[in-house]
Amino acid sequence: MPLHPLVTAVQAWAQAHRRGLAWGFSLGLTGLAATAFGLAPLAPSATDLPQRMVTQTLLPAVNLGDQLEALSDVPLELYRSDTTRKQDTAETLLGRLGVNDAQAAAFIRQDRQARKLLEGRAQKMVRAKADASGRLIELVARYPAEQRNLADTHFLRLTLKRVDDAWVTDLETVELQSRVQLGSGTIRSSLFAATDEAQMPDAIASQMAEIFSGDIDFHRELKRGDSFSVVYESLTADGEPINWNQAAGRVLAAEFINNGRVHQAVWFKDAQRGSYYDFSGKSKRRAFLASPMEFSRVTSGFAMRFHPIHQRVMAHTGVDYGAPVGTPTRSVADGTVEFAGWQGGYGNTVIVRHGGDKTTLYAHLSRIDVRRGERVQQGQRIGAVGATGTATGPHLHFEFRVSGRHVDPLKAARNAAPIPLAEPSRGAFMAQAQVLRTKLDVAATLVGDSGRGD
Ligand SMILES: [Zn+2]
């Protein structure tokens, strides 16, 4: 029996779009998930079909010819998703979406509203619906809301729809939805390798490092076998995880076991602002950060190194962080810039005084972003990693001094007294903390599958 034209068309189309076996195609009947051959005979006019027909059970010994005959009356719709690229034209984008429709391309080029698809930032999430011949039926693009104040809560949904033979466009501002997710892992090589394995976004890994930045120096202290569990929120646009917002989703609760020590944090927002606390209600914010560099995929790959020149020429009284030239360097606490300039073997150097007798020093910088006398805040960028002065390679030399004497920056960070939660918020905090505690425990049990496996 020769193949039915529709089947041939589908095959030809699939052949032409071999690369994209990730997308699905569906028949015109909503919810129908059967293959062409699994269909029950349909009523004479497919267009009159009520939805419930979809759920009919298969009849045995159906006549294949009749089936296909009926099927050919059902409009075939093909869905495909992609993201826009910087160099995209209407044609290249539609091409990747499996659409071959010059009229639609012309519309996207000319219509003021439709043109937005290719204007502004790339990486718009696009989903196209086409018929078997590649004619565009509908296209929906989802991308960040333009107004700054909406960017974290809303997205734009641009819809192009063929109605009879005209195009209708619609641009809506829609609220993002949030979904709570659990993740966990064990460090074998690096934090990012572990979070990759747990399929967690980079932003969540970085947030975790920031949350525990008063407890753990993620650059120097991570140990093989350290483990984490985390409850976080991820933002979705019409159910699809968004790809544009670095702050996409927030860590709601996390536990990090570093070298056998358990650190925990839970997000809580009182009347004024949100912040992280441990489960007893002590703020995770400390007067000093453990590390003068933000933890990122870039810096995490650099192993700690010793610097022979320092060792020989001067008593080594600081901590060295290997990092690429240009990596931002931050002040570990609020303070005033006491020195900004060249200082012998230290090269470009910044010294910040943090009230009283405490100072921090940042050396070998490739650039300095602050001036003497300037007030700086904790986490503020003061310069960038370099190799100026007597440095064998790019690294940040960091010192923490009390009354001019060097002390261990980690000890100093941990000794800073935590700020307790305001008493009126305590009840609400305890209730929320308990809910998240339970979720965190569930997350921890997931480790068995992905992390602690071997
Ligand atoms: Zn050094």
Image: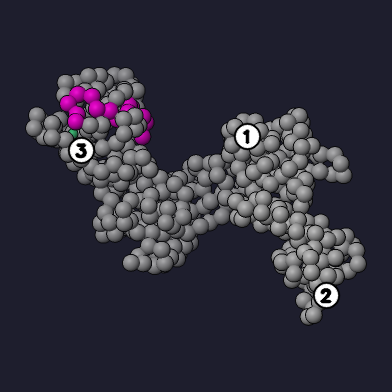
Classify mark 3: residues with Cα within 10 Å, few (<14), some (14-19) or many (20+).
Answer: many
Image quadrant occupied by the C terminus: bottom left
Query: How far is disc 2 from disc 1 in space, using C-alphas?
Result: 47 Å
Asked if the magenta segment contains residue 387, the reply would be yes
| Residue furthest front in the image | 1
**What element does badge 1 sit on?**
loop
**What element does badge 3 sit on?**
strand
In this figure, which residue is indicated by the disc labeled 2? 63
In this figure, which residue is indicated by the disc labeled 3? 319
Query: Disc 3 beta carbon < 8 A from ligand 1?
Result: yes
Image quadrant occupied by the N terminus: bottom right
Q: Which mark is residue 88?
A: 1
Classify mark 2: residues with Cα within 10 Å, few (<14), some (14-19) or many (20+).
Answer: few
Nearest the viewer among 367 and 417 is: 367
Asked if the magenta segment contains residue 93, the reply would be no
Query: How far is disc 2 from disc 3 in space, using C-alphas?
Result: 79 Å
Nearest the viewer among 215 and 388 is: 388
- Which comes sooner in the sequence, label 3 or label 1? 1
Query: Disc 1 beta carbon < 8 A from ligand 1?
Result: no
- Of badges 2 and 1, the one in the foreground is 2
Amino acid residing under circle 1:
Asp
Q: Is residue 84 visible?
A: yes
Amino acid residing under circle 3:
Val
